[in-house]
């Protein structure tokens, strides 16, 4: 299958949805697309470290088989030949899952796919490899004892966020089109905001998980992509039942790739700071302008706060209890290999009592009830995704005024406690020319509302241009 002159000459602006159409019309071959992805990964990964594993031989073999199916007009599934990636917290058959930790061996049987990996594979996608994560996904930046530092393609001296930082970088540079992230406190939305890409945390239980996360009901799996349409395409594949997940929710209804580009009649509550967050002035300015565009799209927007106080202590109780669970499975010799920050948090978790845990559950219950009441009046809550800009690599916090990663992610983790769907949509650039995300939060199981609204917003704001010198140079 040969490219025609009308076909794109590179992947710079190509999306998964567009690629499928090019496959149908035989203007582009899965082999050509996968080869270019692999070449771009080879060029960028030594600097940016988005991938901890790339399987060139397997990817090319699957691409050749996909090309044969498209030549015969019989693709095996809706993602046939589309390059995709899996985060290194998620099981993938034949590849090690080290979770960014030296405490886990690269040796193993590795014979099973996690549900999300299985669905992507069954739909015919070409899984290129695994993306980087901090150790056990414990923090909001991406560096680990095994794989080192992952860098932001907008400026390699800055972090892309985390814990799905590798997936965020891969999405920003089109190193594949569909990227799996996980989000226990913002880990999809943080890197989406910092890299100028789209990230979606579905309602808990819509995308099945196995094995269970140590963070249990805080952890959500979802898509990270360049465009909302690609995330919708991916959600329609991954949000399917799997008997291994006992927490699985109702059947996801799916959504068409081209919903209406209007927000007429949608009721939006816009909170600039949740009533307690300190937001950088330029980020606030960009967010305010984006919200003006929501009004221009027909939404009814009211400035309001949902009315809760910072639930950081409750969140920390669940988070550090999960870290303690991980630590309990690691012997003393292996503990010497752990990220010191993770170890401190896990040791803090060992001091949590059953009464502490039950108190956190009570806070979570009340917060969930309050947000359910909020959504009786408003279809969406809109906030900045993050109050700060991307900061220097090698740090867990922007500066010494922040104690830990949860202090600079106050807009994201409350909605892991409530298990609501939440997305980060690129909304513009700050005074440094760095991406700013707009967060959309919906009522539980209103995932299609969040995605349709994100699609309309993207149609107005567009996705961020990747023409900056640092981005262009990274893939040459």
Image: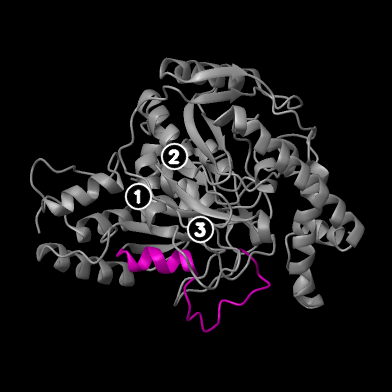
Q: Which residues are magenta?
A: 100-124
- Residue position marked by numbered label 1 in the rendering: 233
Residues at marks 2 and 3 touching, judged by CB atoms closer than 8 Å: no
Residue at which label 3 appears? 207
Label 2's element?
helix
> Would residue 123 be counted in the magenta stretch?
yes
Task: Assess whether mark 1 and mark 3 are in contact (beta carbons under 8 angstroms).
Answer: no
State the residue position of label 2: 451
Q: Position of residue 349 (x, y in %)?
A: 84, 59
Q: Is residue 325 left or right of residue 93?
A: right
Q: Judge from the rendering whether residue 408 lies leftward or rightward of residue 161; answer left or right.
A: right
Q: Which secondary structure dominates the residues rendered in magenta?
A: loop
Residue at 56% in and 37% down: 442
Is 3 rendered above or below residue 80?
above
Q: Is residue 153 visible?
A: no
For the residues labelled 3 and 1, the Cα–Cα distance comes to: 14 Å
């Amino acid at each position: 299958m040969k490219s025609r002159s009308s076909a794109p000459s590179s992947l710079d602006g190509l999306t998964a949805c567009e690629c499928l159409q090019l496959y149908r019309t035989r203007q582009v071959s899965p082999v050509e697309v996968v080869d270019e992805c692999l070449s771009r990964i080879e060029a960028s990964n030594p600097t940016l470290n988005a991938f901890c594993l790339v399987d060139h031989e397997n990817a090319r073999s699957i691409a050749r088989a996909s090309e044969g199916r498209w030549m015969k007009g019989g693709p095996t599934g809706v993602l046939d030949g589309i390059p995709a990636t899996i985060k290194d917290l998620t099981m993938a058959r034949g590849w090690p899952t080290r979770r960014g930790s030296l405490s886990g061996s690269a040796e193993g049987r590795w014979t099973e796919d996690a549900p999300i990996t299985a669905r992507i594979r069954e739909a015919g996608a070409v899984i290129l490899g695994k993306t980087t994560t901090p150790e056990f996904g414990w923090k909001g930046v991406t560096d680990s004892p095994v794989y080192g530092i992952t860098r932001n393609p907008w400026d390699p001296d800055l972090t892309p966020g985390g814990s799905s930082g590798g997936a965020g970088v891969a999405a920003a540079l089109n190193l594949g089109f569909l990227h799996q992230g996980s989000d226990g406190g913002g880990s999809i939305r943080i890197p989406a905001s910092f890299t100028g890409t789209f990230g979606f945390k579905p309602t808990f239980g819509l995308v099945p998980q196995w094995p269970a996360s140590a963070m249990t009901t805080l952890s959500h799996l979802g898509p990270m992509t360049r465009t909302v349409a690609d995330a919708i395409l991916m959600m329609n594949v991954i949000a399917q039942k799997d008997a291994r997940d006992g927490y699985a929710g109702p059947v996801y209804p799916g959504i068409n790739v081209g919903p209406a580009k209007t927000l007429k009649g949608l009721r939006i509550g816009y909170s600039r700071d949740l009533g307690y967050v300190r937001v950088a002035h330029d980020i606030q300015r960009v967010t305010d302008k984006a919200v003006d565009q929501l009004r221009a799209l027909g939404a009814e927007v009211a400035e309001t706060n949902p009315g809760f106080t910072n639930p950081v202590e409750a969140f920390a109780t669940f988070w550090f209890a999960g870290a303690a669970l991980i630590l309990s499975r690691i012997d003393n010799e292996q503990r010497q290999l752990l990220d010191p920050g993770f170890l401190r948090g896990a040791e803090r978790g060992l001091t949590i009592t059953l009464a502490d845990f039950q108190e956190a559950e009570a806070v979570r219950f009340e917060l969930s009830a309050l947000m359910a009441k909020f959504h009786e009046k408003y279809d969406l809550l809109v906030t900045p995704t993050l109050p700060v800009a991307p900061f220097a690599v090698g740090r867990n916090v922007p500066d010494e005024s922040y104690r830990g990663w949860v202090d600079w992610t106050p807009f994201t983790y409350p909605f892991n406690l409530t298990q609501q769907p939440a997305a980060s949509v690129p909304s513009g650039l700050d005074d440094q020319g760095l991406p700013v995300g707009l967060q959309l939060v919906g009522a539980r199981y209103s995932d299609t509302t969040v995605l349709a609204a994100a699609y309309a917003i993207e149609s107005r704001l567009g996705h961020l241009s990747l023409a900056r010198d640092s981005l262009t140079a990274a893939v040459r």
